[in-house]
Amino acid sequence: MNNFTFHRKHMTALPTDLLLDPTISIEAKAFAGILRAISEGNHSSAELAILLNVPEEKVFPALSELKELGFLSVEEQDGIFQLNIM
């Protein structure tokens, strides 16, 4: 059996029901954590893909999943999407 020691300095809290729900994809869970951890402001889908270490085409399905589950609200203003993680 392997033992692990974790050291944390900066933390990002995510809802436990999001993390432990087996029906939610790992991409959506990771994306929720990234959205809570990055600074507010403008970010491109390419930048978010880099942060998640996934192809850019996986960004929108993860966003859609979080939105459908009620963990993310999305509003469009002048062609810019405003994301609010719950």
Image (cartoon, helix red, strand yellow):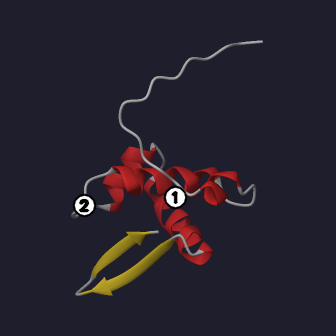
* Image coordinates for residue 32, horizontal then vertical, percent: 49, 57
Q: Is residue 56 left or right of residue 81?
A: right
Numbered label attached to residue 40: 2
Mark 1 Cα-neighbour bin, 10 Å: few <14, some 14–19, many ≥20:
some
The amino acid pointed to by label 2 is: Glu
Residue at x 38%, y 45% (from the top left corner): 51
Nearest the camera: 76 or 39?
Answer: 39
In the rendered image, the vertical position of residue 2 relative to residue 35, given as above or below = above
Q: Position of residue 62 (x, y in %)?
A: 54, 63
Marker count (numbered): 2
Disc nearer the start of the sequence (2/1) = 2
Residue pictured at 74% horizontal, 60% vertical: 23
Horizontally, residue 3 falls left or right of residue 59, namely: right
x, y percent for residue 17: 66, 59
- Find residue 84 and report its image quarter: bottom left
Residue 36 or 43: which is nearer the viewer?
36
Label 2 environment density (alpha carbons within 10 Å; few <14, some 14–19, many ≥20)? few
| Secondary structure of the residue carrying numbered label 1 | helix
Residue designated by label 1:
58
- Amino acid carrying mark 1 in the image: Lys
Q: On the image, which quarter does residue 39 sit in?
A: bottom left
